[in-house]
């Protein structure tokens, strides 16, 4: 049997030690690389979350500016034609009055500050984002948004011509919104109010502040996209994966019965059949002073559908549109029968039907971008008029 020399033993021991050290170094090195990669990915995810949040703020300011411009145009038109106010369409006059009323509820024109709170309160966010320029840019955007919200609340140029108390009297203590004569009188009174003229004239002061914040936020957010090397395509993918968790719908996924997420007084059900026909069923629930319970105004819109590339194309058959009124949910006194009948006949009149058709705006081919969630039970359709969110009806 051969024997190891002392030198052989030393070599073996050295090899074992080296192998162990190399193993440790490799393990540590790989773990270190993995850790670094995870940190980089976390930093990128947090960056995209914050950039997306500021992009949403930018979109909200743009929507506020559009609303401001639209209201101002209606107000100027009414002011220029005040001597012949009855020639002005009711829609324009309503837009004019809404422009003067404070605290009009529109969720689309509200700023979502939840991510700002998370960003400011989470030490992890600051530790993850080690680029101080990026952090300062984000903080500056949030400061600008806070300043804008404060000014919209307190700055004299944003104060509406009508006070909350005056608005309450118009809505709750008069028939100005329902009686034609009273409505024209209200419009005339507000046109002669010096506060109305001054508010209309100060539009540029409001637009200046909106545009100032808009320009600064765009500049800072675009700078952050360059700092983190984030493209618009990546942001879109981030939104769909992490915020919406959605993908484009296939024809098979579209098939079925869907109901819209809506308020209690309105419902929409749409059926996409396998033969590529569809039908919208719309129920509008109404209350009245001449009956108890709920009356349901119904309309049905048939048509054809298809998927082209990433879009859902709807071609409604407007001529086949049907109207009905469901009276099963109401009761009334016998002496009110004629009034109820007149109310229902009005709902089924040709004039009301034409108004409904105009509101629905489904008189031609309509294209929607589609997004469907991972479960296949939620569908988003986005067109020029906004987004419609549907939930698959359980069979």
Image (tube, grey):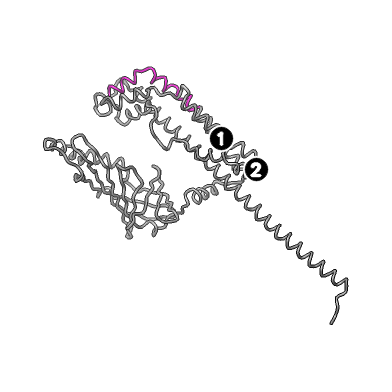
Q: Nearer the viewer, residue 343 or 125?
A: 125
Query: Which quarter of the figure is the N terminus placed in?
Result: bottom right
| Front of the two marks 1 and 2 | 2
Q: Please, what secondary structure does the residue beneath circle 1 have?
A: helix
- Write the residue at 39% across / 58% down: 253
Q: Quadrant of residue 306?
A: bottom left
Q: Please, what secondary structure does the residue beneath circle 2 have?
A: loop
Instruction: Point out residue 87 in the picture as x, y percentages from the top left corner.
Output: 28, 26
- Write the residue at 50% across / 48% down: 239
**198 part of magenta stretch:** yes
Pointer 2 residue:
130
Q: Magenta stretch mostly in which secondary structure? A: helix
Segment tinted magenta in the rendering: 184-208
Numbered circle sitting on residue 389: none
Q: Is residue 347 above or below residue 33?
A: above
Query: Which quarter of the figure is the C terminus placed in?
Result: bottom left
Q: Nearer the viewer, residue 307 or 164?
A: 164
Q: Quadrant of residue 126?
A: top right
Instruction: Point out residue 365 in the picture as x, y percentages from the top left corner.
Output: 35, 48
Q: Nearer the viewer, residue 163 or 358?
A: 163
State the CA–CA distance, disc 1 to disc 2: 18 Å
Pointer 1 residue:
141
Badge 1 or badge 2: first in the primary sequence: 2
CA neighbours of label 1 inside 10 A, class few (<14), some (14 to 19), many (20+): many
């Amino acid at each position: 049997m051969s024997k190891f020399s002392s030198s052989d033993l030393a070599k073996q021991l050295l090899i074992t030690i080296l192998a162990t050290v190399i193993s440790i170094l490799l393990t540590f090195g790989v773990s270190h690389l993995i850790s670094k990669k995870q940190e980089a990915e976390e930093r990128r995810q947090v960056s995209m979350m914050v950039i997306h949040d500021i992009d949403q703020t930018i979109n909200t300011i743009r929507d506020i500016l559009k609303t401001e411009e639209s209201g101002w145009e209606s107000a100027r038109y009414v002011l220029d034609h005040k001597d012949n106010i009855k020639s002005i369409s009711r829609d324009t006059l309503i837009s004019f009055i809404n422009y003067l009323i404070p605290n009009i509820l529109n969720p689309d024109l509200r700023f979502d500050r939840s991510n700002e709170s998370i960003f400011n309160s989470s030490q992890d966010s600051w530790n993850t984002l080690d680029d101080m320029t990026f952090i300062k840019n984000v903080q500056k955007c949030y400061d600008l948004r806070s300043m804008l919200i404060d000014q919209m609340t307190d700055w004299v140029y944003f104060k509406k011509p009508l006070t909350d108390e005056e608005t309450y009297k118009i809505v709750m203590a008069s028939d100005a919104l329902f009686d034609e004569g009273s409505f024209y009188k209200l419009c005339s009174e507000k046109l002669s109010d010096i506060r109305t003229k001054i508010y209309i004239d100060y539009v540029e002061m409001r637009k200046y502040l909106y545009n100032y914040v808009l320009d600064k936020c765009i500049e800072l957010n675009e700078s952050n996209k360059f700092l983190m090397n984030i493209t618009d395509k990546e942001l879109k993918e981030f939104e769909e994966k992490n915020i919406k968790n959605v993908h484009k719908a296939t024809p098979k996924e579209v098939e079925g019965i869907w109901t819209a997420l809506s308020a209690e007084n309105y419902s929409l059900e749409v059926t996409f059949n396998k033969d590529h026909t569809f039908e919208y069923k719309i129920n509008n629930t109404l209350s009245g002073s001449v009956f108890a319970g709920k009356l349901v105004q119904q309309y049905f819109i048939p048509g054809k559908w298809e998927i082209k590339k990433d879009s859902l194309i709807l071609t409604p058959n407007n001529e086949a549109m049907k109207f009905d009124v469901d009276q099963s949910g109401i009761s009334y006194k016998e002496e009110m029968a004629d009034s109820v009948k007149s109310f229902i006949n009005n709902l089924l009149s040709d004039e009301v039907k034409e108004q409904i058709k105009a509101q629905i705006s489904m008189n031609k081919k309509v294209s929607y971008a589609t997004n469907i969630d991972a479960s296949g039970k939620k569908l988003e359709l986005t067109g020029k008029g906004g987004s419609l969110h549907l939930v698959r009806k359980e069979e």
